[in-house]
């Protein structure tokens, strides 16, 4: 814990931690020490971790990277973090992220962007990805031994791929969403970001639980994910979806994908070409459903109950207070999504956009169901269409171009499936590249076991 606290201080330029809790960390480390001496240690006991800002931690500012939650210190604890503390993990602080987890570069954060510890060939600063950019940067720079992330459309897997770390998005419902500040509730899922697949297995085991506080959380026992890491994947059937071979995919990604398939084949898996025909509709469906749910979830930030409130002029009424608060508190990306979401949910356009996107979502899920019913155990695909891009791309670029980067990640959120990004190779500039394995629902142990072959 002391080593991590020192490393965090020394790595301030990465802007990974946005709130430090050194006193809490030392107290928890001491308690963990006592627990270890008493012979009562769990696998996470004494392990220092960072927590994405979107998780409510009692007594610690929790803003989800947003100005509108300035001054909000929750009086309750998210189930995920409570589970981690019960397991003996040590809280180092809150990690940077895109505002309300909307983004792919960490640049929509009210704290400014986190920075990737990897540098471009000319020394250029790179984005660690997003929205869990602070988590990825912190794990890659050894500021913590693991971090929590959340993944609504790729926010665990994309930053993991951009920083050469491991990121696991569990099955929807494996991990409780209680106390996790909501983006799009039918897609959001928390998961671990770590250096190795084994660490991800251990950390998922500590984070997951059934939870009556979250009615979408599955009432299932949490298996021993680490015990599933046998290294034996003989006879597994791993699908290569032809629709993921998108136009303009860089050669390095294509080569990496083939290399990953080779590694799995060498370990005894059977590689099978498969088709997921509705893949091309996933991005548009995601960028209707996610903003729709976001516009509804973010309606609660009205200046009355939480965080920031605009100061009023003498003649201003409550409507003016709402408007000013939201105009000041939400950044441009969040405002854009609230507007998109409100539009697609409006009476005149509900059927044309929102209902149609829901039907597309069902078809995407059916594609995966059919592949699994045909005996496929997992699906291998790239995690991202490129390596990490320069810092500033998100701010300057066209938002639609940025949305297109989520092409490989959003499908499984729509289908509720688990997926893991594993660092497998490098591009010509030496930057890390990741592959993604998509698993059967609630079979994260099996997925982790197959993913370990790619490390
Ligand atoms: N980049 C995606 C988005 O902006 C993913 C975000 C996420 O998974 N939280 O919606």
Image: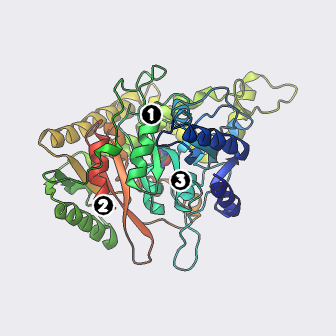
Q: Name the residue rendered at 11%, 42% in the picture.
A: 374
Residue designated by label 2: 454
Compute the Cα span from label 2 to label 1. Answer: 40 Å
- Of the two numbered discs 2 and 3 on the same chain, state the one appearing first in sequence: 3
Q: Check disc 2: other Cα within 10 Å, few if <14, some if 14-19, many if 20+.
A: many
**Which dot marks residue 189?**
none
Compute the Cα span from label 2 to label 3. Answer: 20 Å
Residue designated by label 1: 344
Q: Nearer the viewer, mark 3 or mark 1?
A: 3
Q: Name the residue rendered at 55%, 72% in the picture.
A: 119
Q: Check disc 3: other Cα within 10 Å, few if <14, some if 14-19, many if 20+.
A: many
Query: How far from the left and from the top, in percent, is residue 170?
Result: 38, 40
360 left or right, relative to 103: left
Residue designated by label 3: 145
Is 141 placed above or below 23 here?
below
| The one of 174 and 234 positioned closer to us in this rendering | 234
- Of the two numbered discs 3 and 1 on the same chain, state the one appearing first in sequence: 3
| The one of 363 and 218 positioned closer to us in this rendering | 218
| The one of 431 and 412 positioned closer to us in this rendering | 431
Asked if residue 385 can be seen in this view, the reply is: no
Query: How far from the left and from the top, in percent, is residue 139?
Result: 53, 56
402 left or right, relative to 90: left
């Amino acid at each position: 814990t002391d080593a991590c606290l020192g490393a965090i201080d020394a790595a301030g330029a990465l802007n990974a931690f946005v709130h430090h809790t050194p006193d809490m960390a030392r107290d928890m480390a001491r308690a963990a020490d006592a627990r270890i001496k008493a012979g009562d240690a769990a696998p996470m006991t004494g392990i220092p971790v960072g927590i994405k800002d979107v998780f409510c931690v009692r007594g610690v500012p929790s803003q989800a990277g947003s100005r509108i939650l300035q001054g909000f210190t929750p009086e309750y604890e998210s189930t995920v973090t409570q589970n981690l503390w019960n397991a003996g993990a040590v809280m180092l602080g809150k990690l940077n992220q895109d505002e309300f987890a909307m983004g792919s570069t960490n640049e929509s954060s009210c704290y400014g962007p986190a920075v990737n510890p990897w540098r471009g060939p000319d020394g250029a600063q790179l984005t660690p990805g997003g929205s869990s950019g602070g988590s990825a940067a912190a794990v890659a720079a050894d500021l913590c031994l693991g971090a929590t992330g959340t993944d609504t459309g790729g926010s665990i897997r994309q930053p993991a791929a951009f920083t050469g770390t491991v990121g696991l998005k569990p099955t929807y419902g494996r991990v409780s969403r209680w106390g996790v500040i909501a983006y799009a509730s039918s897609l959001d899922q928390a998961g671990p970001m770590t250096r190795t697949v084994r660490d991800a297995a251990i950390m998922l085991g500590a984070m997951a639980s059934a939870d009556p506080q979250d009615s979408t959380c599955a009432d299932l026992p949490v298996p021993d994910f680490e015990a599933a890491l046998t290294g034996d994947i003989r006879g597994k059937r791993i699908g290569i979806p032809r629709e993921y071979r998108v136009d303009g995919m860089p050669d390095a990604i294509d080569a990496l994908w083939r290399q990953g398939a080779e590694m799995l084949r060498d370990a005894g898996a059977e590689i099978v070409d498969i088709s997921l025909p509705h893949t091309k509709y996933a991005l548009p469906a995601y960028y209707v459903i996610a903003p729709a749910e976001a516009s509804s979830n973010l309606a609660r930030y009205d200046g009355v109950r939480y965080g920031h409130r605009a100061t009023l002029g003498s003649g201003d009424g409550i409507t003016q207070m709402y408007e000013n608060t939201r105009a000041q508190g939400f950044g441009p990306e969040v405002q854009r999504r609230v507007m998109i979401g409100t539009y697609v949910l409006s009476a005149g356009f509900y059927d044309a956009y929102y209902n149609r996107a829901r039907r597309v979502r069902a078809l995407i899920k059916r594609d995966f169901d059919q592949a699994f019913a045909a005996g496929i155990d997992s699906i291998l695909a790239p995690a991202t269409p490129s390596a990490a891009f320069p810092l500033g791309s998100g701010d300057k670029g066209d938002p639609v171009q940025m949305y297109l980067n989520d092409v490989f990640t959003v499908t499984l959120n729509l289908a509720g499936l688990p997926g893991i990004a594993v660092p497998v190779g490098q591009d010509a500039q030496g930057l890390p590249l990741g592959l993604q394995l998509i698993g059967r629902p609630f079979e994260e142990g099996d997925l982790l076991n197959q993913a370990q072959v790619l490390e």
